[in-house]
Amino acid sequence: MDENQGRWAAMVEQSQSGQDAYVWAVGPIQLADSREHARAVAAELAKTYRPTHPRRLRRRSVFRHGEDTLFVLLEGMSSKFHLRITVVQLVADLDAEGRPFEG
């Protein structure tokens, strides 16, 4: 598929506290017009997205991992959480029978 075709987005994955462990959850998926637009959206989300935890944010550190992934470390008063924001391209959207999904 051509780099400029398809549906692009910035996808947030975030750690959430579970009963005895941290689990990953998919956060918002922000649609974009192109890969470059999705990269700009991802950069903005890395600086501004406010997850549930930590409740009292003290520090936010943003790291780039390759061209399409940002890792965000969030330090609260007594705990650390993290986000991963990735530029993604929808390559298939299928129903249970494997046909194109008609929503």
Image (cartoon, helix red, strand yellow):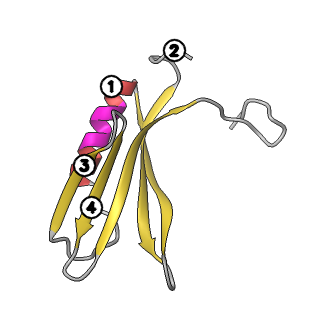
The amino acid on which the numbered mark 1 sits, given as a three-letter code, is: Glu
On whether residue 40 falls in the magenta region, the answer is yes
Q: Secondary structure at mark 1?
A: helix
- Look at the numbered disc 4 and give the secondary structure of its residue: strand
Q: Nearer the viewer, residue 95 or 66?
A: 66
Q: Secondary structure at mark 3?
A: strand
Q: Which residue is mark 4?
A: 73
Residue designated by label 2 = 2
Residue type at mark 3? Phe
Q: Which residue is mark 1?
A: 36
Residue neighbourhood size for the residue with mark 3, other residues' Cα within 10 Å, grouped as few (<14), some (14–19), many (≥20): few
Spatial separation of the CA atoms under disc 3 and disc 4: 8 Å
Closer to us: 57 or 31: 57
Query: Looking at the picture, which amino acid does disc 2 mark?
Result: Asp
- Quadrant of residue 99 in the image? top right
User: Residue at label 3?
Assistant: 63
Task: Tell which tag, 1 or 3, sits nearer the viewer.
Answer: 3
First in sequence: mark 2 vs mark 4: 2
Residues at circles 1 and 4 in contact by the CB criterion of under 8 Å: no
Q: Position of residue 57 (x, y in %)?
A: 19, 71
